[in-house]
Image: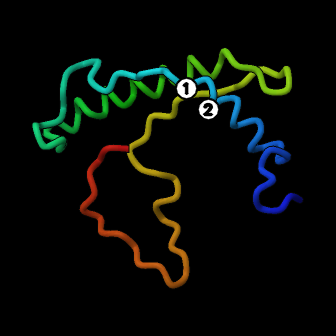
Amino acid sequence: MHVSGQSAYNPVEHSMSTLSQKLVGIILPIDKFGSYLNSQSQIIDSELAIKNFRHTGKLLCILWKRDLIFRKPVTVQYTDQKRSPFDDIIFPGSVKESDNESDIP
């Protein structure tokens, strides 16, 4: 167990940091298949947004598969789903957000 501020000694955080470092300086396209935002950066085409999001997620998987953590290969897979597996979790004392959210993952 490590106290706050000692994340460099936490093996999970240390492993994830190598994956994050791979993304430094990389610019991922948000509109590979066309723009889905209006001039106010609001989503105007949900299907196109999902298609672009999927493309970017798959690119991240390709990048992370090339990395090793502690000399072991990284296994990563893009999972295409519109809702979070945590949507049904309600913590005591919390207010569940409205269901009027966009279908964008």
Number of residue marks: 2
Rendered position, 42 above or below 5: above
Residue picked out by circle 1: 24
The quarter of the picture where residue 99 lies is bottom left
In depth, the one of 43 and 11 nearer the eye is: 11
**Structural crowding at the residue carrying mark 1, measured as other residues with C-alpha within 10 Å and reported as few (<14), some (14–19) or many (≥20):** few
Rendered position, 50 above or below 2: above
Secondary structure of the residue carrying tag 2 is helix
In depth, the one of 26 and 74 nearer the eye is: 26
Q: Are marks 1 and 2 in contact (CB under 8 Å)?
A: yes
Residue picked out by circle 2: 20
Query: Which color scheme is applied?
Result: rainbow
Name the residue at 41% across, 23% down: 28
Between marks 1 and 2, how big is the CA–CA gap?
A: 7 Å
Q: Position of residue 5 (x, y in %)?
A: 76, 56
Rendered position, 104 above or below 6: above
The quadrant the N terminus occupies is: bottom right
Q: Is residue 42 left or right of residue 75?
A: left
Q: Is residue 28 left or right of residue 89?
A: left
Amino acid on which the number 1 mark rests in the picture:
Val
Q: Can you name the residue that lies furthest to the front here?
A: 5
Name the residue at 85% across, 26% down: 70
The quadrant the C terminus occupies is: top left
Name the residue at 76% across, 35% down: 15
Q: Is residue 98 left or right of residue 38?
A: right
In depth, the one of 1 and 46 nearer the eye is: 1
Amino acid on which the number 2 mark rests in the picture:
Ser
Q: Position of residue 7 (x, y in %)?
A: 77, 50
